[in-house]
Image: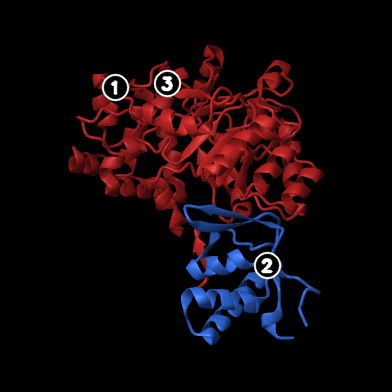
Amino acid sequence: MSGYLEELKLPDFHLWKRTEEKRIPLSAEIELTERCNNNCIHCYINLPANDEETKKRELSFEEIRSMVDQAVEMGCLWWLITGGEPLVREDFTDIYLYLKKKGLLVSVFTNATLITRKLASLFERYPPRDLEITVYGVTQKTYERVTRTPGSFEACRRGMNLLQEGDVPFTLKAMALRSNVSELEAMKDFCKPISKGHFRFDPFLHLRLRPNDKINRQIKNERLSPEEIVAIELADDERKNGLLKHICEEKKIGRETVHFHNDNHLFYCGAGKTSFTIDPYGFFKLCSSLSHPDCVYDLRKSSLKEAWEKFVPKIRRMRTEDEECRKKCLGCPLINLCMWCPATAYLECGKLDRHIDDFCQIAHARAQALGLEKKVCKKIV
Amino acid sequence: MDKLERIYAKSRDLVEREIEGEIIIVPLTSGIGDLEDKLFSLNKVGKDVWARIDGKKRLFEIVEELKEIYEVDREKLMTDILGFLAELEKRKLVVEEVGCQVT
């Protein structure tokens, strides 16, 4: 290869560091809709696919185009399309092609049940950077116990077959919950060959972005106990090694993520540093989970540039005076093993800066199981 | 025909982005510059050549223009640019404009 052209592995690309230093919004996510054709028992966002009132409130294609143009102008390169189920949008193809033609590296998260031959051909001709499909079970009974939608298992398999017929690569991932945990190993066996030997699962079930006591109770019932979570994580080498690598890397960069007791900044994470989310109604968020009304910005009334340059720094400067949060959460050496962050704390209890006991238990159970608890605490505290 | 008489155009199946001075070539359709977990990066001379691939300029014109800028040995520059174009063509990032050669 001549020295003029270099092939670089994505993590090695020199641009990433520069974009972080200069705070360029390199990565964006759009929740195209909260609507979904499934009705998953654990879902934090879904509304019925035929909810006409919701549909009317969603961003139009023209509005999305304008936001995409602004983002590209500001240096955005990655764009994730998610939902709800993004394929319920009748104009999905237009939106997808627009993103592709703007030179964005587009990822799509879908349940695959609405993949048609036409959509498979679209992805074959204009491949997404990533196409991720969530699997809820390997048997119809389990799958549909989660989705609560008759025919969804068959529809998902049909969608995957259409993608495979069109040579469209995709990866599979799973949520681990009470209703399907008995099939987790079987899901792993099913997913790995399709996903190049990898299997990702997520046992952390978020509560509803728009609080709903009844559904939140249902989601909590689906959550696995800390012991169960640790057991399935330890049984999975990829996950276990990932956790160890994660905490070791975070320890190396130290202050960035592991806070000290006198630091009361709420946002220790990367939210809003080089990425952002747009919700289906045009609200800008620092990350998909951060739905506190003070932390969202209406892009229908102002520009992305304003959101990025004025609003984000204001949010990232937020501090807490809550002593328990400072000591037990922000000052905790296990924070990188914990599901706690201001966004998830808000979903759990309506406050950004509250300690969440359930999360704490999981973090400590994880640390103990990985043999990290004493080592990490001793070294950092 | 002399390779330097050739005219190349950028493929219509890619989108060129410039972020922070970095040229990023994003394939639009399948089969173009397929690199699952990689990206292309161009060095300074690569960027200068890439900027001149416009479906009009013959390669020798590009060589002459860059020779003026970089003050390097013409033969060396010519060899490098031909090698670079061959790589781009192999990855379908450029296409030769057939029928545009000047006799």
Please indicate, yes or no, whether residue A341 appears anywhere in the rendered image: no
Q: Secondary structure at mark 2?
A: strand
Q: How busy is the neighbourhood of tag 3: few (under 14 within 10 Å), some, or many (20 plus)?
A: many
Asked whether, in this view, residue A364 is left or right of residue B102, the answer is: left
Q: Give the camera-side residue of A312 and B81.
A: B81
Q: Which mark is residue A346?
A: 3
Residue A40 location, x and y as percent? 63, 26
Disc 1 designates what residue?
A320
| Chain ID, red in image | A
Q: Secondary structure at mark 3?
A: helix
Please indicate, yes or no, whether residue A120 appears anywhere in the rendered image: yes
Q: Give the camera-side residue of A139 and A302.
A: A302
For the point 65% across and 36% down, the residue is A65
Task: Name the front one of labels 2 and 1.
Answer: 2
Which image quarter is the N terminus of chain A in? bottom right
For the point 63% across and 52% down, the residue is A194
What is the CA distance from the residue labelled 3 to the residue labelled 2?
51 Å
Q: Give the camera-side residue of A80 and A61.
A: A61
Residue type at the position of mark 1? Thr
Instruction: Of the two numbered discs 1 and 3 on the same chain, state the one appearing first in sequence.
Output: 1
A318 over A96 or under it: above or below? above
| Chain ID, blue in image | B
What is the CA distance from the residue labelled 1 to the residue labelled 3?
13 Å
Please identify the residue farthest to the top as the structure is shown.
A213
Task: Name the front one of labels 1 and 3.
Answer: 1
